[in-house]
Structure formats: structure tokens, C-alpha cells
Image (cartoon, rainbow, N blue to C red):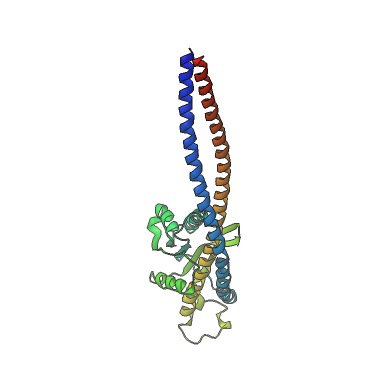
Amino acid sequence: MFRLGASQVARAGVRNYATLREIEMRLKSIKNIEKITNTMKIVASTRLNKAQRAMQASRVFNESDTEFYKNTEPEKEADAKTLLIVISSDKGLCGSIHTQISKAARRRIEELNGNVDVVAVGDKVKAQLSRTHADLLKLAFSGVGKAEPTFHEAALLADEISTLGKYENTEILYNKFVSGVAFEPSNFSVFAADAIEKAPGLSKYELESEGTAETLSEFSLANSLLTAQAEGYASEVSARRNAMDNASKNAGDMINSYSILYNRTRQAVITNELVDIITGASSLD
């Protein structure tokens, strides 16, 4: 009976040693993850300040378009096909921000009864919409959202989108920056040249040539894309900072839990070793 007890103690000691090594390795991995998430949080916090400045600057561009549409009062064509431009980016690790904009895009497509063509700006929204509305996806852009958007980038996007042809109704769907901890899917319309020319309030403005309405429409599209990208970029950076902050806190909680478990397991190993020593000494008597 005595020998069986010693054997059981020995096996328990081996298990405790193995468990202790596993806990130590897990603890080391979590600490490394915490370092990474903390670094990403700091980087995101730095970028957020720049993103907010870019967002404020872009709003100035959009204010002129908003004022123009308010004064001229152009109207949408009721039965015309809509071009829906959905703004996201290529990067992840930012919570549910890309999922939310994709859900909003699907809802808008249903509201338009499928009478819509879709342009996806960013790999994230492209991947999600391709699974459900691949037949409506006419154009997709990648390599966006890596830095603060510029008007040059927005103008290039507008030029490429214009190759799809003329749409009477164009909507841009994007994540609107609300605060450092909140965002919401939002959209605004960009009117075609025909709608601008038919606007009842257009007579308030003196147009120099027949092509002015077309130029206004193209310029308005670029302005709107810039604003949507800047709002979306600020929302994404803010969401990433919050996600990394939560990840760091969770990692810290796990480190505390595993540290307690490690200490308890280590104490159990020491206790088993003492039992082995006492058992061995007793067997010699």
C-alpha cells in the first residue's frame, strides 16, 4: 500500500510539472500579445489626431456642396437606378466597424428593391458584399484607408467611378464619426448633371456655360468621396484604438488569472516534492 501511494505521488508530480510549463508558456504568450495590443493602441491614438484634422478639413469641402444643394433643391428620379458607393478600407482589427457598414449596405439595397449597382471601396466591404450581392457589385477598389485621405485620391476614385456611365441617383454610404467611442453608418446623395439642371433653385446662380452642371456634379462627387473617406478613416482609427484598448485590458485580466494559477500550481509542485522527500526519509527508517 505504501509503494502504491508513492507511485501516485510521483505521477501527480509529473503532471504538475507539465501543467506548470504549459501555464508558463501561456502566460508568456499573453504577455507578448499585451505588448502588441498596447503598441497598436498607442499608434492608433497618434493617428486619430491626424485623422480628426483631416476629417475637419474635408467637411469644409462638403459644406459648399450641401449649401448648393440646399439652395437649388434638386430632386431624385423616382424609378431610376441608384449607384451605391460603400466606403470602408482594407484593414481589420477595428471591431465591428466593417460589419456595420456592410449590414447598412444590405439594408439600403433591400430598400431600393435591388434597383441598384454597387461600388465597394475597400477589401473588407467587398468581401462581405460579394457573399450576398455579387451580381450587383460593379466596381471595387483596394489599397485604400492606409493613411489620411486626400482630394487627389478622391478625385481618382471619382474618375474611375465615372467610367461606369451616368446614374441619375448616386448615394455614398460611410461610417460617420460621432465621437471617440461612437460611429454610425450614414449616407448622402450626389446629384447628376440632369438633376442639377432641372433644379428649381438653379436660377439663383449664374452659370457661364452649358457644361457647368456636369462639372459641378463631378466635383461634388469627388468632394463627397473625400468627406466620406475622411469620416470613415477617423471612425476606423478610433474603433481600432478602442479595440486594442479592450484587448489590452482583457490580456491584463488573463495575465492576473494565469499568474495566480501559476503560483498555486507551483506551490502544489513544491508540496509534492516535500511529500516525496518525507516519504523517502520515512521509507529509510
Q: Position of residue 279 (x, y in %)?
A: 51, 19
Towards the viewer: 143 or 16 = 16
Q: Name above or below for residue 238 compared with residue 165.
A: above
Residue 211 can be seen, yes or no: yes
Determine whether, in the image, residue 68 is placed left or right of residue 217.
right
Q: Residue furthest bottom?
A: 208
Q: Position of residue 98 (x, y in %)?
A: 49, 56
Q: Residue at x 45, y 24 (%)?
A: 11
The x, y position of residue 62, in whole percent, is 55, 73
Task: Name the residue at 50% across, 23% down.
Answer: 276
Who's the residue at 60% across and 57% down the image?
A: 182
Q: Residue furthest top?
A: 1
Closest to the observer, 116 or 27: 27
Where residue 15 appears, as percent x and y from the top left, is 46, 28
Task: Indicate whether 203 appears above or below 24.
Answer: below
Front residue (pair 139, 112): 139
Residue pictured at 55% horizontal, 75% vertical = 61
Q: Is residue 95 visible?
A: no
